[in-house]
Amino acid sequence: MLDLTLRFLAWMLSICTPHPRGRHRLGAAPPLRIRPLPPPRFTELLDGSASRLVRPYVLSPAEHRRQRERRRALYLATLGIDTGPDRIHGVRVPAAVR
C-alpha cells in the first residue's frame, strides 16, 4: 500500500512540476543583483515623553464587565436563551417578552 501511495505522489509531482528538458532547460542561475540600502528617512530622535503610554486593548473594570455580559448573552443566545436588556428605548420590557 505504501508503494502505491509513493507512486501516486510521484506521478502527481511529475504532473504539477515543470520538466527541465530541451531548450527550456534552465542553465546557470542568473547572478544576484544586490542593491545598496537607501539611507534612513528619519534621523532625528523620537521623544518618548510626548506620546501617551496607553494600550488600547486594556479595559477599565466597567468596560470589562460590560464585555463579559455581552459575551455571556451571545453564548446563551447560541443555546436558545434570550437575555436581552431590561429597558429598550427607556421602556421597561417584561421578562416574558424578552
Image: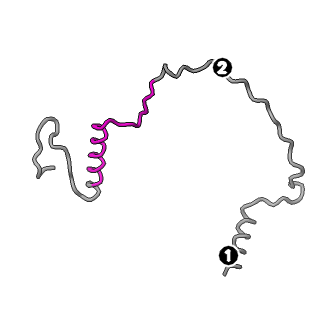
Query: In front here: 57 or 98?
Result: 57
43 relative to 89 in the view: left or right: right
In the image, the segment drawn in magenta is 52-75
What's the amino acid at mark 2? Thr
- Picture disc at residue 43: 2
Residue corresponding to mark 1: 5
- Residue extending farthest bottom: 1
Rounded to the nearest angstrom, the CA distance separating label 2 from label 1 is 59 Å
47 relative to 82 in the view: left or right: right
Query: In front here: 48 or 18?
Result: 48
Instruction: Indicate the secondary structure of the residue bearing disc 2.
Output: loop
Badge 2, how many Cα within 10 Å: few under 14, some, many 20+? few
Instruction: Indicate the secondary structure of the residue bearing disc 1.
Output: helix
* Residue occupying the point 67% across, 75% down: 5
- Picture disc at residue 28: none
In this picture, is 8 found above or below 34?
below
What's the amino acid at mark 1? Thr
* Residue occupying the point 73% across, 70% down: 11
71 magenta-colored: yes
Badge 1, how many Cα within 10 Å: few under 14, some, many 20+? few
Which of the 4 image quarters holds residue 90? top left
Query: In front here: 57 or 36?
Result: 57
Q: Main secondary structure of the magenta part?
A: helix
* Residue occupying the point 48% across, 22% down: 51
Horizontal and vertical percent for residue 32? 83, 40
Horizontal and vertical percent for residue 97? 13, 50
Which of the 4 image quarters holds residue 37? top right
Q: Earlier in the sequence, mark 2 or mark 1?
A: 1
Quarter of the figure that contains the N terminus: bottom right
79 magenta-colored: no
Horizontal and vertical percent for residue 80? 24, 58
